Each structure stands twice: as structure tokens, then as C-alpha cells.
């Protein structure tokens, strides 16, 4: 919710892509190949600093256990971990009292309403409602304007189940005042 990134970019985030001094994260999006710069919200900074304090060993991943689960493959070498992490996320959504999927007449499978990707939509919607410049939101999401306007921004339609997160959201104010983020200057 604080980054607007897809699940893979979040669970496979590495420590060398975080700059605590600049308060920036650099993520190469797996879907588009774009490298995006994400400003670190105060609450996210607090969480990342806490994670760094209890970092065990020489792991590159911010969340090593989740990254290992995500990278899990079956006997044929096919990735199955992405589904496992998604199932974990759906369990959390149910645990907080939301039903992630709903039945739709005429469809065999339920339609997912809440999932990890919902946080990406929520981020875009909050930014739009708060007046964050579209160029800034696009650069963080790594998407083009047509896609964000058509599919990601749900101004005035944000579910009341998520509304409680908006009150006092520190990231929105920070984003409103940001110029377009600089290109990353990290050694590879």
C-alpha cells in the first residue's frame, strides 16, 4: 500500500535497492522491465529500519522467508511459490474480516475483489484523490497514463473496508510535494 508495486516486486525486494539516506527504493518491475523510484513513506521507513535491525545473516532479501516461499518450484521446475504467497495474502484478507472473492452469476469461478494487487489500485486511487501529480504516480507505478486512468484509479469508489487506512496516511502528503523522482544511482 505504501509503494504501489506488484507482489513480486515487494516480496523479492533486496536491501541493496533501498537507500535510507535518500529515503528511496529502486525496483525493476518484472512485468514491464521498467526501473522505478519509490519515495519511502515515514511508516514504511520505520518498518524497513526495524527489519534491518533484526536482519539475520547475509541475506539479500528484505523478507527472506517470503522470498524463499515465492521462489519455490515444483518437481518439474515450474514456479508454484507465487500462488503460495498469494494464498497467504488471501488468508490475511479473510483474517481482517473481508471476503476476497465473490460469486458472479454466469461465471464458474469467483471474482477476486481484494488481493495483493488491490493495494496497487488503492495506492493509485489515494494519490489521485489527494491531488498527487499524475506524472509522479505514473513514475512510481511504472505504468502508462491510459492504464492508470482506466483501470487503477477509482476516485470516490475506494471500498469502505479500506477507508480506515486513508486517515492520516503519511505517504500521500509526502508524494504531493515531490518532483519527479531522480534516476537511480546504485552500483549493480
Image: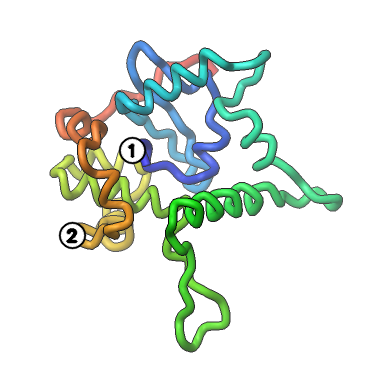
Q: Is residue 103 above or below residue 96?
A: below
Q: Residues within 10 Å of mark 1 (few under 14, many from 20)?
A: many
- Viewer-closest of 179 and 112: 112
Q: What colour scheme was applied to this rendering of the protein? A: rainbow
Residue found 48% across the figure and 35% down from its top: 28
Q: Quadrant of the C terminus?
A: top right
| For residue 98, side relative to residue 62 (left or right) | left
Snapshot quadrant of residue 133 = top left
Which residue is the site of mark 2?
156
Residue at point 86% right, 50% down?
Answer: 75
- Find residue 140 and name its label: 1
Q: Which mark is residue 119?
A: none
- 144 lies left or right of 11: left
Percent across and percent down for residue 168 are 21, 36
Local crowd size for mark 2, using a 10 Å CA cut-off: few (<14), some (14–19), many (≥20): few
Q: SS class of the residue under badge 2?
A: loop
Compared with 20, 96 (above or below) is below
The x, y position of residue 91, in whole percent, is 56, 53
Q: Where does residue 72 sit, x and y in percent of width and height? A: 73, 43
Q: Quadrant of the N terminus?
A: top left
Left or right for 48, reference 135: right
Q: Nearer the viewer, mark 1 or mark 2?
A: 2
- The residue drawn where x is 43% and y is 59% is 98
Asked whether disc 1 touches disc 2, contact meaning CB atoms under 8 Å apart, the reply is no
Local SS, label 1 = helix
Amino acid at each position: 500500500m505504501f509503494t504501489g508495486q506488484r507482489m513480486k516486486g515487494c516480496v523479492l525486494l533486496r536491501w541493496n535497492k533501498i537507500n535510507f539516506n535518500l529515503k528511496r527504493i529502486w525496483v525493476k518491475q518484472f512485468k514491464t522491465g521498467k526501473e522505478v523510484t519509490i519515495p519511502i513513506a515515514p511508516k514504511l521507513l520505520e518498518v524497513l529500519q526495524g527489519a534491518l535491525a533484526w536482519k539475520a545473516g547475509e541475506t539479500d532479501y528484505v523478507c527472506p522467508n517470503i522470498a524463499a516461499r515465492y521462489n519455490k518450484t515444483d518437481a518439474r521446475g515450474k514456479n508454484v511459490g507465487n500462488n503460495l504467497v498469494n494464498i497467504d495474502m488471501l488468508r490475511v484478507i479473510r483474517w481482517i474480516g473481508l471476503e476476497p472473492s465473490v460469486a458472479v452469476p454466469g461465471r464458474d469461478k469467483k471474482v477476486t475483489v481484494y488481493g495483493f494487487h488491490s493495494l496497487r489500485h488503492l495506492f493509485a486511487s489515494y494519490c489521485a484523490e489527494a491531488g498527487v501529480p499524475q506524472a509522479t504516480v505514473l513514475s512510481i507505478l511504472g505504468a502508462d497514463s491510459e492504464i492508470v486512468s482506466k483501470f487503477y484509479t477509482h476516485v470516490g469508489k475506494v471500498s469502505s473496508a479500506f477507508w480506515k487506512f486513508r486517515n492520516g496516511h503519511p505517504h500521500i502528503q509526502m508524494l504531493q510535494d515531490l518532483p519527479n523522482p531522480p534516476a537511480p544511482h546504485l552500483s549493480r
